[in-house]
Amino acid sequence: DGVGHFSRLSDAIKYARMIRKFSDNYGSPIIKLSSGIFKETITHSSVTEADYLTQAAYNNVYRDGVWIDFPVTIQGSGSETVIDFTNIWSDTTTSETKLQTKH
């Protein structure tokens, strides 16, 4: 039934957005996940943790990670499906990983 297999949920969401834009008749895309843990770390090299909700940051957050701004259904295979996102911002101090910028 599906049209593709993706190793990252963010890629599947971007693909579903593209399909949705091409055809209003398509309806709401459905992303089906197999059982398991889907870990994805999203690195935002140009957005600070303090400013991630500002208008200026939206384009960068969208480019770097997951931005769901359209109707989409994400279905898992029962309680064994887990989505685990970690965001790393350019100034992250709450994570074990802090993005290092080169000067």
Image: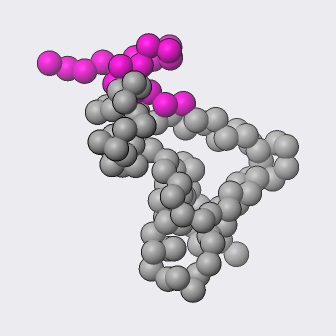
Verify whether residue 38 appears in magenta: no
x, y percentage for residue 2?
65, 71
Instruction: Please determine whether, in this image, residue 72 is positioned above or below residue 9.
Output: below
Q: How many marks?
A: 0
Instruction: Please determine whether, in this image, residue 46 is positioned above or below residue 103.
Output: below
Task: Examine the rendering and report whether any part of residue 64 can be seen.
Answer: no
Q: Is residue 4 left or right of residue 82?
A: left
Instruction: Please determine whether, in this image, residue 64 is positioned above or below residue 47.
Output: below
Q: Is residue 46 left or right of residue 18?
A: left
x, y percentage for residue 101?
25, 21
User: Which image quarter is the N terminus in?
Assistant: bottom right
Q: Is residue 39 left or right of residue 45?
A: right
* Residue at x-position 42% and y-position 37%: 53
Write down the region rendered in magenta: 86-103
Residue lying farthest to the bottom in this orientation: 25
Verify whether residue 87 appears in magenta: yes
Type of colouring = one colour
* Residue at x-position 49% and y-position 47%: 66
Q: Nearer the viewer, residue 16 or 36?
A: 16
x, y percentage for residue 62?
40, 49
Task: Examine the rendering and report whether any part of residue 71 can be seen.
Answer: yes
Q: Main secondary structure of the magenta part?
A: loop
Residue lying farthest to the front in this orientation: 55
x, y percentage for residue 80?
82, 42
User: Which image quarter is the C terminus in?
Assistant: top left
Q: Nearer the viewer, residue 79 or 62?
A: 62
